Amino acid sequence: MNLVDAARNAREKAYAPYSQFKVGAAIRAESGTVFCGVNVENVAYPEGTCAEAGAIAAMVLGGDSKIAEVAVIADSPAPVPPCGGCRQKLAEFAEMDVKVTLATTRGEVLETTVGALLPGAFGAGHLVNTPDNKA
């Protein structure tokens, strides 16, 4: 399955009544399963959720825990990168070299990586007494 197409199909179901800025995201887990998410706005803008976060939640619910590839699409003049919070979320579930395709509904595409989106990512390995970093 083409991830940009999956993200495009998901985007149609986004809930963005205030901004009209609909975003769709698709994640291919290491298992090969594709999970999608959409942005869901709330009248209190910071209380909404991002498409990338929704796709990650769906992946976790589906029993997967590692991202192999990401695609995000929005109706914008140029490809829109994930917000800072979603960059951090992606970094927690993906290796830094995982491909991220950012696309517009007009056909513009930018390919990058999780690491390029979030250089110097903070992770569980930085914390004491976690499975990644035993004290």
Image: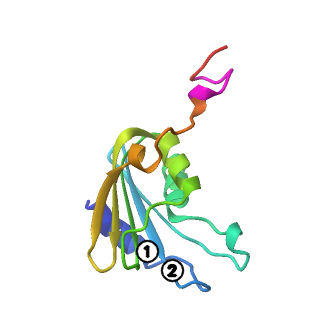
Residue shown at the point (67%, 13%) measured from the top left: 135
Q: Which amino acid does label 2 sit on?
A: Phe
| Measured Cα–Cα span from mark 1 to mark 2 | 10 Å
Mark 2 crowd level (few <14, some 14–19, many ≥20, 10 Å Cα): some
Of all residues, the one furthest to the right in this rendering is 44
Magenta-colored segment: predominant secondary structure: loop
The segment highlighted magenta reads 125-131
Which secondary structure lies at badge 2?
Answer: loop
Q: Is residue 78 left or right of residue 58?
A: left
Residue shown at the point (64%, 24%) measured from the top left: 130
Which one is closest to the eye, mark 1 or mark 2? Answer: 2
- Tag 1 residue: 11
Mark 1 crowd level (few <14, some 14–19, many ≥20, 10 Å Cα): many
Residue shown at the point (47%, 72%) measured from the top left: 23
Report the front residue among 23 and 118: 118
Tell me where residue 59 appears, x and y as whole percent.
Answer: 48, 50
Q: Which label sits on residue 24?
A: none
- Tag 2 residue: 21
